[in-house]
Image (tube, helix red, strand yellow):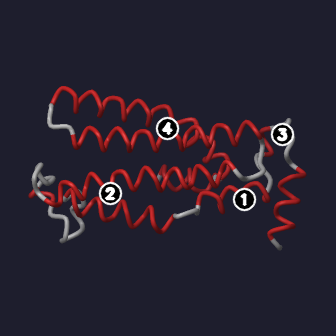
Amino acid sequence: MSRFDERAEAAAVDQRRGDQDNGPSAAEVRVVKRALATQHQKLQDDVSSLEVLLHANPSNPNAPVEQGPPLPGDPSFDLAVKFMGRVADDIRAVQAAVSRIKIDKDDKNVLTEGLHDLAKAWDERKYAFATPEPASSAAKYRTAHEFERDAIPALKLLEIYFPDLAEEDES
């Protein structure tokens, strides 16, 4: 199916689905999947690099957890802060791609708002990590968790679009 056909098919389902039991159409799933794949590899690479910089992946010998995260003044520290910002920017690129697709208006709003909240959570995490003042850092981490909590409706919506993914997570 050509991109034009997919867009035309998605446009045909622009009106709100009356029966949520039917779920999104195959065309809607395809356009959402394509939008979510925007910069997927870059996002994955940035998160992987961040795990190494923070020594946060016990299965990766380049990220020994026992070393703990880098301390301020260490070049890895500044690079970790930079990569946290990159992750937020990668998520914003996905959000921009989702904002351009033609799917149910309410679903689109939930997804774009959820992605916005995730990007803001990474921004807050970046500020929290870079902040030397413990109380201020803790407040930023709490704010990051609040943004992540606000993104939960988008995750639940994705489980409707991709029910097989939800079943895999439960295993």
For the residues marked 3 and 2, what is the alpha-carbon distance in whole angstroms?
39 Å
- If the image is split into quadrants, where does the N terminus sit? bottom right
Of labels 2 and 4, the one closer to you: 2
Marks 4,1: beta carbons within 8 A:
no
Q: Amino acid at mark 1?
A: Val
| Number of residues whose C-alpha sits closer than 10 Å to that of mark 3, classed few (under 14), some (14–19) or many (20 or more) | few
Q: Of helix, strand and loop, which one carries label 2?
A: helix
Residue 18: quarter of image = top right
Marks 3,4: beta carbons within 8 A:
no
| Number of residues whose C-alpha sits closer than 10 Å to that of mark 4, classed few (under 14), some (14–19) or many (20 or more) | many
Residue in the picture at 32% in, 57% down:
83
Q: Earlier in the sequence, mark 1 or mark 2?
A: 1
Which residue is labeled 4 in the image?
A: 117
Q: Amino acid at mark 3?
A: Arg
Which residue is labeled 3 in the image?
A: 17
Of labels 1 and 2, the one closer to you: 2
Q: Of helix, strand and loop, which one carries label 4?
A: helix
Q: Of helix, strand and loop, which one carries label 3?
A: loop
Of labels 3 and 4, the one closer to you: 4
Q: How many marks?
A: 4
Q: Earlier in the sequence, mark 3 or mark 4?
A: 3
Name the mark on residue 31: 1
Q: Of helix, strand and loop, which one carries label 1?
A: helix
Q: Earlier in the sequence, mark 2 or mark 4?
A: 2
Where residue 55 sits: x, y (%)? 19, 59
For the residues marked 3 and 1, what is the alpha-carbon distance in whole angstroms?
16 Å
